[in-house]
């Protein structure tokens, strides 16, 4: 029921904040802001505040660093846990 992201052949991972707004638990602005904070804590990621209503993307090159990829995967694991708990 939840599509979390898309990976595009032009080298970006698109984060589906726009779609999150329509499903629990990310219908809550507070939850989307918590997600934004987690993503922005990844070195090389700097999404603007208004990203929580859009479909911003992250360059795949950012994820060539092992720690950045680990943080992104941890973020999606957190999201899945939040969805399951809702």
Image: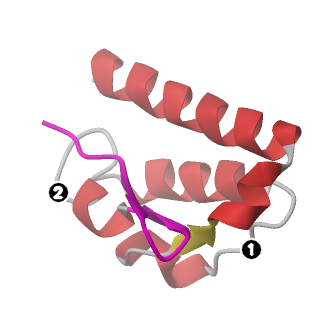
Residue at 65% in and 75% down: 47
Q: Quadrant of residue 83?
A: top left
Tell me where residue 82 appears, x and y as whole percent: 41, 26
CA–CA distance in space, label 2 to label 1: 24 Å
Image vertical order of residue 57 relative to residue 13, above or below: below
Magenta residues, start to end: 1-15
Asked if the magenta segment contains residue 13, the reply would be yes
In the rendered image, the vertical position of residue 50 relative to residue 4, given as above or below: below
Q: Position of residue 10 (x, y in %)?
A: 48, 77
Q: How is the image coloured?
A: secondary structure
Horizontally, residue 1 falls left or right of residue 85, namely: left
Crowding at mark 1 (Cα within 10 Å: few <14, some 14-19, many 20+): some
Mark seen at residue 46: 1
Per the image, the residue denoted by label 2 is: 22
Q: Could you tell me which secondary element the residue under label 1 belongs to?
A: loop
Magenta-span inclusion, residue 6: yes
Q: Residues within 10 Å of mark 2 (few under 14, many from 20)?
A: few
Q: Specify whether 76 is left or right of 85.
A: right
């Amino acid at each position: 029921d939840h599509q979390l992201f898309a990976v595009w052949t032009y080298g970006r991972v698109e984060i589906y904040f726009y779609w999150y707004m329509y499903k629990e638990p990310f219908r809550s602005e507070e939850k989307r802001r918590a997600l934004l904070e987690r993503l922005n804590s990844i070195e090389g990621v700097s999404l603007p505040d208004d990203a929580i209503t859009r479909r911003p993307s992250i360059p795949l090159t950012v994820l060539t660093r092992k720690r950045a990829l680990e943080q992104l995967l941890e973020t999606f694991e957190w999201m899945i846990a939040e969805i399951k708990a809702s």
